[in-house]
Image (tube, helix red, strand yellow):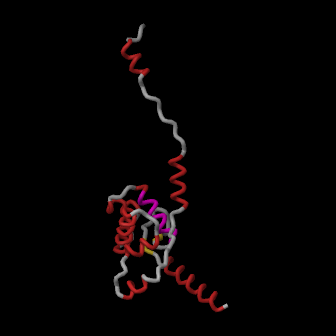
Amino acid sequence: MEIPVQVTEALEEKPEEKKRTGKTREHYNKQKSQAYSYFRIRSEDAEKMQNAQFTIFDFITNSFAFSQTKKELTVHVLESLKKQPMTFIELQRSLNAKKSTLYMLVLALQRSGLVSRAEKNEPLKLSNEFADTVRKYAQWWDGWLEH
């Protein structure tokens, strides 16, 4: 049986599949390894705080080197969790967020002590661990100054 010429030509014209380079995985692993707060303390913020002008967005800006869009999503995550604890899926649905983006944000919030959960599928909730750690840094600094 002879294969028609048209079918043979169509098979020959099929583009080659791209080989994976692993760069996407490398990029993802780099993002994951850097998913925590680099908290920046700015002395001029003290006046904004005293005058009730400091916002949660200011706090997130000082805490994370995220893009504007991710900072805004982070604020929405924190505001949602302030209302009530939520599972990751509930949070994703309520914010209509991409799973991978939300995962990285939640991971950064957890590693920074702003958000916690008891077990993997348990609801996420706000945490005082960040504030406790910052107080310990301040106490360490006070002690260091005295010696």
Residue drawn at (50%, 65%) of the image: 119
Most foreground residue, 27 or 91: 27
Residue drawn at (39%, 75%) of the image: 58
Instruction: Give percent across and percent down for residue 41.
Output: 49, 78
Question: How many labels were placed on the picture?
Answer: 0
* Dominant SS type (magenta): helix
Instruction: Give percent across and percent down for residue 60.
Output: 42, 72
Q: Residue furthest right?
A: 147
- Tell me if 43 is positioned left or right of 139 in this view: left
Most foreground residue, 44 or 127: 44
Q: Residue furthest bottom?
A: 146
Q: Quadrant of residue 51?
A: bottom left
Most foreground residue, 17 or 124: 17
- Tell me if 41 is positioned left or right of 57 in this view: right
Q: Which residues are magenta?
A: 101-112
Question: Does 56 sit above or below residue 135?
Answer: above
Instruction: Give percent across and percent down for residue 28.
Output: 51, 53
Question: Does 55 sit above or below residue 76?
Answer: below
As for residue 108 lying within the magenta part, the answer is yes
Task: State the quadrant of the C terminus.
Answer: bottom right
Question: Does 146 sit above or below residue 31?
Answer: below
Q: Quadrant of residue 29?
A: bottom right
Q: Residue furthest top?
A: 1
Most foreground residue, 79 or 29: 29
Task: State the quadrant of the N terminus.
Answer: top left
Residue drawn at (36%, 62%) of the image: 69
